[in-house]
Image: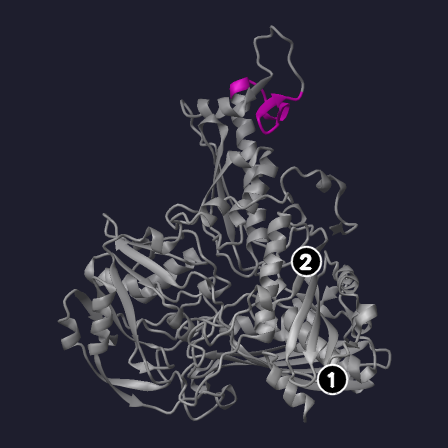
Amino acid sequence: MAYSQKRPAEAKKLRVVGAPLIKRDAKALVTGKPVYTDDLAMKDCLIVKVLRSPYAHALIREIDCAVASKVQGIECILTWKDVPKKRFTMAGQTYPEPSPYDRLILDQRMRFVGDAVAIVAGEDEACVDRAMRLIKVKYEVLEPVLDMHDAKDGDILVHPEEDWKALCPVGADNMRNLCACGKDEAGDLEAAFAGSSHVIERVYHTKANQQAMMETFRAFTYMDIYGRLVVTASTQVTFHVRRILAHALDVPKSKIRVIKPRIGGGFGAKQTVIAEVYPAIVTMKTGKPAKIVYSRYESQIASSPRHEMEVKVKLGCDDEGILQAIDVYTLSNTGAYGEHGPTTVGLSGHKSIPLYGTPKAFRFAYDVVYTNRMSAGAYRGYGATQGIFAVESAIDELAAELHMDPVKLREKNMVREGQVMPAYYGETAESCTLDRCVDRVKEMIGWDEKYPRKDMGNGKVRGVGIAMAMQGSSISKVDVASVTIKVNDDGFYSMTIGASDMGTGCDTTLAQVAAECLNCEMDDIVVYGVDTDISPYDSGSYASSTAYLTGNAVVKTCETLKKKIIKKAAEYLSCGEDELEFTGKSVKRLTPVPEGSGFENEISLLDIGNRAMCFNNEALQATESCTSPVSPPPFMAGAAEVEVDMETGQIDLIQFVSAVDCGTPLNENLARVQTEGGLVQGIGMALYEDVTYLKNGHVCENSLMQYKLPTRLDIGRVQVELECSYEPTGPFGAKSIGEIVINTPSPAIANAVYNAVGVRIRELPITAEKIFNGLNQ
């Protein structure tokens, strides 16, 4: 594990940060302890299910629940007539949300196959299922718009309602089927292209992908003794859930408490409040506990998959391969509702164009359109994945035009440490080892020996391909992280965080940061998860924010707490604060007093903690918040080796290697696990995962029998290395790692296929059929 030369010498002396410690909850998870939402739900919860629309676009003209209501055990059936008529968004984003307010809990208009028609609650699953079959609905079936190319300014409106509204100026117009539109540019683009010796223009298409986390969407709700709604949910955005439910239910936020237990995976899906509103409205109506657990079928047809995007890339360079201009246009399909539509699309350009530091001009424009398909949402990579697939594929296509090694073309143009990135909001790459990442994967894959292809002599050909990526570390000037730490009797610490550990291990890594700052052992730090009544505010676990932003909040909190500990010690030792130092286990005088003076030289943290429990006017507790004016990007390079059967087009991934610059990793083991998991998801997106629709708007891949996820047998050999830099604004030099790791497989594999057999695949997934057709054109 190599480090940038900017890494301070003192940072090498860290005790806990960087150590490959096992996750604190590992034993509980592998032994099946009851830690997840459904494990904790009350036994007498009403079972809640949603009746869903069979049509992509329709109006409910009549709905008859009389017979269904008489089924024994049914507590209530709710329709659009029974819920508040207040529009909201399910997107878990900082307020005011960029996503339009375009939803009702239940609506008269159905906008996709799977949209919510009615909510049914009963004593058990059997009676609820029976009642759902007995509800009679008369629809006026309307013509849908299913192709995103037909949506903008089309005759069919997905959201014709007058109470639709956008809180932020994101270029949204529901009367044009626009969820968002915009443009960003710098330099004279036309002149830059005119001065280019070589210009290419290509179009790439990425489809929706399902996050397919092990724990599906679920929540349970009840009323506490004070008449407040308590929601326990598997969510990444605990505080946003409270706000969203308050808007949807039209009640004050003070009437809602949200608790996050352990999460069985999120990957961005649980940044959207998919399920919580349904048991919440049932509890509000009945006063009884209620729970909902999405089936895998519901998760496939009515959730929040990755946005389908079509990305047009135009590149210009001189005869030496130096890029002069980059032009990117993205058409994004947000589906029936606008969750994350305005924000996801931005990353398709702002996290792909800045990978290259040489262009004199760039332009990035986009449209996000409504269609009558399943609503899209957040997924790891969050738009960067789609844009990087396009730009990194186009770079290889430009290299082919130049008859140049694509690694050499990247080496000529990649962003380097110290460069300003105009397409990344003008930020400077203060920490960047992208050049070393490329060198490392080139060595790991054996590029010089294998590029471009090797005929195996048995009808199969192997090829190698490479790609680069960048992401961010929180949303600059927006996200907020907060941490509270208190000293308990006997001197151990309680740390309360607002960030959601969704399997990433942030409870462990943040405890490592605290233990490092407080010079104590990990066992001295007790970490509490998120409860909106208790935890300090945190925007949530998304946008790769936790390690960087919450980690910085931990550092700030520890510094404040240490000052309070020293102040209290000064009181007990009868001296000035400037005469003392905190050692972790105790506070002692910088200059000892002579024995027999009547004064102590040192007081232990254990004694301070216990003495503060009596006759004390100031709590030994600190809370600090952190936000950031910048979002330091992590960088990555990945390379793939594939084998293609020239007769059938069958493709096998032989190996995938990667090198990641995430600054200084807070936990080396967890950084590697994050990378490996993200690579597997990226490989699935590249080769297997497909979402297709019938002409009537039905999703074909409605189970894991149809929706192929990669297994261990499908991913070949995966190798991960860390090429660390030192980010001066990060906690102990750390940047993020959670999202970037999914971004390189798709373009690297597509580039490897081209180098192997000369077939360029511009639409994911890359299948044997597409390669076969390319070989036989």
Could you tell me which secondary element the residue under label 1 belongs to?
Answer: loop
Task: State the separation of the CA atoms marked 2 and 1.
Answer: 28 Å
| Residue bounds of the magenta highlight | 572-590
Magenta highlight on residue 576: yes
Magenta highlight on residue 372: no
Crowding at mark 1 (Cα within 10 Å: few <14, some 14-19, many 20+): some
Query: Which residue in the rendered view is the most extreme toward the right?
Result: 320
Report x, y in % for residue 388.
65, 73
Report x, y in % for residue 244.
38, 63
Image check: 298 left or right of 366? Answer: left
**Above or below, comparing residue 505 to residue 747 in the picture:** above
Report x, y in % for residue 309.
56, 79
Could you tell me which secondary element the residue under label 2 belongs to?
Answer: strand
Q: In the picture, residue 453 is in which quadrant?
A: bottom right
Image check: 60 left or right of 161? Answer: left
- Residue flagged by tag 1: what amino acid is it? Gly
Q: In the picture, residue 207 is in which quadrant?
A: bottom right
- Number of the label disc, if any, that sits on residue 758: 1
Q: Earlier in the sequence, mark 2 or mark 1?
A: 2
- Number of the label disc, if any, that sits on residue 720: 2
- Number of the label disc, if any, that sits on residue 728: none
Q: Would residue 461 be seen by someone viewing this image from the given angle?
A: yes
Report x, y in % for residue 232.
35, 54
